């Protein structure tokens, strides 16, 4: 079993559909049912508009159909115990329970779609009712489910780990060690706004606010438009940009970007709309950002990846806002700033914040911005 992705020459219902995943078996024949499902995920389903989401679904489906192929099992005849064996095999290979559960739920979704599409009459999955002893969510008081939920019987109990974050002195030391300056600004964006890697890499110069005439004591809203910024779920959202960071980005845009854009124009025959380009005029990738952070981590012995700085923002920002407006409003604030679809996701930072002393939170942004001003 092999996984491939279409290019811009693939036309479906009259439109080019690049990056749509599809599977081929060991004979390099297209595998009809999963490929139809993956096209549904990529081109029809309104809740899966991100290319990264398509690839996540594709990898989960690929894992399952590779298991079926290796064991000569027909996907329409696979049994409940055989899927359980696939699950146990993933655990034996060292996959985390959360990863295994994600794959099981994805494949369960495939079978539900296949039943609705009349491709099969049966599914190897079963559901069972489970009871949650206590809902600790911030909106628990409006829950009318009785704490009873229908759950996939093959999934395993798992615990969401505390998000990895850095204490502020280490985060600042890490940023100080980053070169070149453009990459350093990417780090500051993650730490001071909670932006995701893909949002930083793909940051469009047209959404960057001009700090001229703005109050230096107030943050500036920066709207990440889904039409030009690769936001998760293609949802337009707003991040708050500290004034000093806006100044640093604007200075970078005025002094460094024109030369790099000219190089991009020479190489590709068009201008780039991205804020961050390499000295050779190339647009960066998430892999570049990950690898660059890994090199700095190895050099200064402070383990950090881009998402860790996002978690650091979420942890410190939750505590900072909780001191001002209380925890419930702080959770809603951080949820919106980080682009979470559910406040339950934001609640993971409550446990991370418990590991900090309140004295560490006082004016954390001021301390980070002081270092940024020194850089400039």
Image: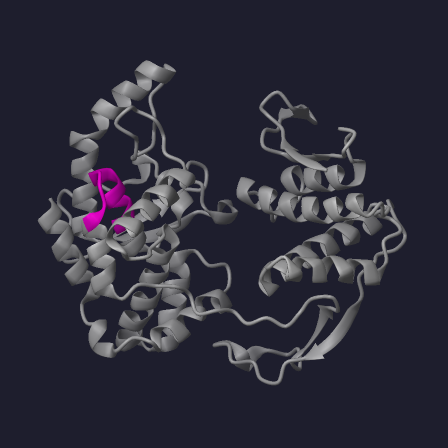
User: Residue 362 sits in which quadrant?
Assistant: bottom left
Q: Residue at x 83, y 62 (%)?
A: 80
Q: Position of residue 355 (x, y in %)?
A: 33, 76
Is residue 320 in the magenta section? Answer: no
Query: Residue pushed farthest bottom?
Result: 133
Q: Nearer the viewer, residue 109 or 321?
A: 109
Residue nearest the viewer, comparing 349 with 184: 184
Front in this rendered view, residue 56 or 273: 56
Residue in view at x 72 percent, y 53 percent: 107
Asked where in the image residue 278 lies, by quadrant, the reply is top left
Q: Which residues are magenta?
A: 177-188
Above or below for 359 versus 339: below
- Where is residue 64 shown, x and y percent of the image? 72, 49
**Dominant secondary structure, magenta:** helix
| Residue 11 seen in the figure | yes
Q: Quadrant of the N terminus?
A: top right
Q: Is residue 139 left or right of residue 149?
A: left
Q: Tell me what residue is drawn at x 79 percent, y 40 percent.
A: 33
Q: Is residue 125 above or below residue 257?
A: below
- In this rendering, would 170 be left or right of 84? left
Task: Pinpoint residue 67: horizontal percent, then vertical percent.
Answer: 75, 48
In the rendered structure, does residue 187 fall within the stretch colored magenta?
Answer: yes
**Vertical placement of 334 versus 208: above or below?**
below
All told, the count of numbered labels is 0
């Amino acid at each position: 079993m092999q996984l491939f992705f279409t290019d811009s020459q693939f036309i479906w219902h009259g439109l080019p559909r690049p990056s749509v995943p599809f599977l081929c078996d060991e004979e390099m024949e297209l595998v009809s049912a999963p490929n139809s499902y993956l096209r549904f995920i990529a081109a029809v389903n309104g809740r899966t508009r991100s290319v990264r989401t398509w690839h996540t679904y594709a990898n989960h489906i690929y894992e399952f159909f590779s298991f079926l192929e290796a064991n000569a099992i027909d996907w329409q005849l696979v049994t409940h115990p055989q899927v359980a064996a696939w699950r146990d095999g993933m655990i034996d290979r060292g996959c985390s329970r959360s990863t295994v559960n994600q794959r099981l739920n994805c494949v369960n979704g495939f079978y539900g779609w296949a039943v609705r599409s009349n491709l099969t009459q049966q599914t190897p999955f079963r559901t069972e009712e489970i009871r949650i002893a206590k809902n600790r969510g911030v909106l628990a008081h409006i829950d009318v489910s009785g704490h009873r939920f229908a759950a996939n019987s093959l999934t395993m109990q798992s615990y969401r780990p505390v998000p990895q974050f850095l204490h502020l002195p280490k985060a600042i030391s890490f940023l100080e060690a980053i070169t070149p300056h453009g990459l350093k600004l990417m780090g500051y964006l993650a730490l001071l706004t909670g932006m995701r890697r893909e949002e930083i890499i793909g940051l469009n110069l047209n959404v960057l606010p001009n700090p001229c005439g703005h109050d230096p004591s107030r943050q500036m809203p920066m709207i990440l438009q889904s039409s030009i910024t690769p936001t998760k779920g293609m949802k337009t959202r707003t991040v708050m940009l500290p004034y000093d960071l806006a100044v640093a980005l604007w200075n970078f845009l005025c002094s460094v970007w024109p030369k790099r854009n000219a190089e991009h124009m020479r190489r590709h025959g068009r201008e780039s709309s991205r804020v961050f380009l390499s000295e050779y005029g190339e647009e960066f990738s998430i892999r570049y950002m990950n690898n660059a952070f890994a090199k700095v981590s190895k050099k200064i012995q402070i383990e950090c990846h881009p998402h860790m700085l996002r978690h650091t923002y979420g942890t410190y920002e939750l505590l900072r806002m909780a001191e001002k407006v209380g925890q419930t409003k702080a959770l809603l604030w951080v949820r919106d700033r980080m682009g979470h679809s559910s406040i339950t996701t934001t609640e993971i930072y409550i446990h991370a914040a418990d590991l900090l002393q309140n004295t560490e939170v006082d004016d954390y942004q001021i301390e980070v911005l002081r270092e940024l001003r020194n850089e400039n």
